[in-house]
Amino acid sequence: MISLHDTVTRTTAPLELRDPGRVSMYVCGPTVYGPAHLGHARMALVFDVLRRYLQWSGLQVTFVSNITDIDDKIIARAAEEGRDAAEVAVDWEAAWYATMQTLGVQRPDSDPHATAYVDAMVELIGDLVEKDSAYVTSDGVYLSVDGVADYGLLAHQSLDDLVAGGGEREIVGAEKRNPADFALWKFAKAGEPSWPSPWGEGRPGWHTECVVMSLDLLGDGFDLHGGGVDLAFPHHENERAQAVACGREFARHWVHNGFVEVGGEKMSKSLGNFTTVDELTAAHDPRALRLLILQAHYRSPVEVTPTSMANAEAALERLDTLARRAEAVGELGPEAACEPDPERLEAFRTRMDDDLDTPGAMAVVFGCVTDANRALDAGDVEAAAPVVAAWRSMLEAVGLEVTAGTDELPADVLEKCAARDRARAERDFGTADALRDELVAQGWVVEDTPDGTTVRRA
RNA sequence: GGCGACGUGGCCGAGUGGUUAGGCAGCGGCCUGCAAAGCCGUGUACACGGGUUCGAUUCCCGUCGUCGCCUCCA
C-alpha cells in the first residue's frame, strides 16, 4: 500500500482507506476566470499521476475535482469585460479543460460546479446557523471559528497565533466576532449574481462549496483531500472547520503539492510572475512538463525554465528513441504480449509507494531504457522484451506517453533517402553527405540504420 | 512577530549514518565511410561553524542565506 505524507500529522504513513480497495479523492480545482498557469499545471499533473498510479496499483479510484464558477474574481472579470459572470466562467472552464487535455490530464470522474450546489450550501449554512456555529451580519453569514475544535490543525498554529500574525486581516466593517471568522454567504450588491437564501440574496463563500460537494459525492470520511500547499490554510482549514462544526467526518488524509517557482519565488497570479500553460506548451512538448514535474518530488518546489524544459525534452527524446527502437523490432511494440520484468516493476512500485517518490521511480524507468538499449544493441530481443514491457507499464502508471513518431514522409523526402542509400551503396559519400545536409536543413533528423537511411521530424 | 521548508558536483534534481540516484551538458572510448542514435568509462557534490559517533552530506546545536504560510492564490 502506498504511504503518503499527511499535512495534518506531518508524517508519512500508509494510506488507510475507508473502504479497502477503493480510493475516494477530492482535489480542489480552479476558479475559472483566467488562463491556467504553471502552478495549476503542477497541481493537476501531480494529482493526475497519483490517480493513475493508484489505479495502476489495482485500486478503484473515484476522483472528484470541482470547478469554482462563482467567485469575486469572476464577478470582477465580468464587470471589466462588461458581460455576464456565468459566461466568463463557462469560457474559462472550457479553456481549462482544453489545457488539461493538452497536458494529458484525465477528466475527473465528476467535476461539481459551485453554482449547481447553491441549495445544498444554503442548507449547510442553515444547519450551522441553527447550531449557533454561524451568525449573520450586515454583509453576510460567518462561521464562528472559536467553537471549532482544533482550528489551526492544517496551519499548525493556534487560533491565537494565526490571528496575531503579521497579516492585516480586515476586521472592521465585517462585524466579525473573531478576525479569523470567514464568510459562508455574502450578500449581493447591486448587479451581482445572486441566489435566494433565508438571510437574503447573495452568493456562497468559497470555502463552503468544497465541503458540500466532497461530502455529497464521496461521503463522510472520504480518503484523500488535495491541492496546492497554499490551499492548506485558509481554504482547507476552513472547509474542515465547517465539517467539524456540522459534526461530520471529513477527509482522512491531506495531501498538498509544492509550488512552481520562478527565480526561487512562488509563481502566482498576484506576483504577476506566471507563465500560462498554453504559452509553455506552444513552445515545448507538453509531455516534457509532465516529465519535469515527475523528476521533482511533489512536495518540493520546482523551477520551470527554458533550460529545465529543454533538459526534460532531451530526456523525453531518450524515451521516444527507445519506443522507436522497440517498435522497429516487431515483437516489442505497445501490443507486445511479453510479461513485464517483475523485479523492475517491484523496484518502481517501492519508489512510488514511498510518498510518491516519482524522481526515484523515474530513475528506475531510465534504468530500463539503458538496459533495454544494451540488450537491443546485442541483438538480444528476448532479454529486452520483459524490460521494455515493464518500462511501458511504468510509463502508463505515470501517464507519460511515448511515441515512435511514425510520421508520414513526403515524397521528395523519401526520394532523397533512396538516393542517399544508392550513393552510400556506391560509396559516393560526397553525394550521400550532401543529401543528408539537405534533409537536415529541411528539419529532419537523419540516421543510418541497417535498413538504410531513416528520417524523422527534428 | 508566530509556524515551517530549503541550501547537493557545470545545470536541474533525488536520497542516505559507512557500498550507484536519475536527467541534461562535458570529456575519453566502442560502433559508423563520416555522423546520429545507442553502449562503456569518466565527476574525492552535499552552505558555514561546532557537537554526538569508530564513522555525518545524512542526527543535534548555532550562524549565514533563500523561500513559503499566517491575506485572494494550485
Image (tube, coloured by chain):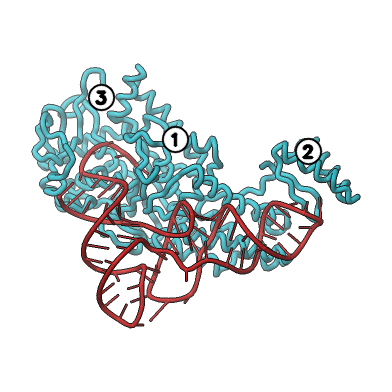
Chain colours: A cyan, B red
**Hey, what amino acid is under mark 3?**
Ser
Q: Is residue A432 left or right of residue A160?
A: right
Do the residues bearing badges 1 and 3 touch, measured as CB atoms within 8 Å?
no
Please state, as top left, top right, bottom left or bottom right, where the N terminus of chain A lies in the image. Answer: bottom left
Q: Determine if residue A47 is in view.
A: no
Image location (x, y in percent) of residue A60: 44, 55
Residue A377 vs residue A163: left or right? right
Q: Earlier in the sequence, mark 1 or mark 3?
A: 3
Residue nearest the observer in this picture, A202 or A393 = A393
The amino acid pointed to by label 1 is Thr
Can residue A33 be seen in this snapshot?
yes
SS under mark 1: loop
Q: Nearer the viewer, residue A336 or A162?
A: A162
Label 2 sits on residue? A413
Q: Mark 2 to mark 3: distance in Å?
A: 62 Å
Spot occupied by residue B51 in the image (x, y as percentages of width and height): 25, 75
Residue at 43% of width from left, 47% of height from top?
A303
Q: Nearer the viewer, residue A69 or A420?
A: A420
Q: Which label was assigned to residue A276?
A: 1
Name the mark nearer the viewer: 2 or 3: 2
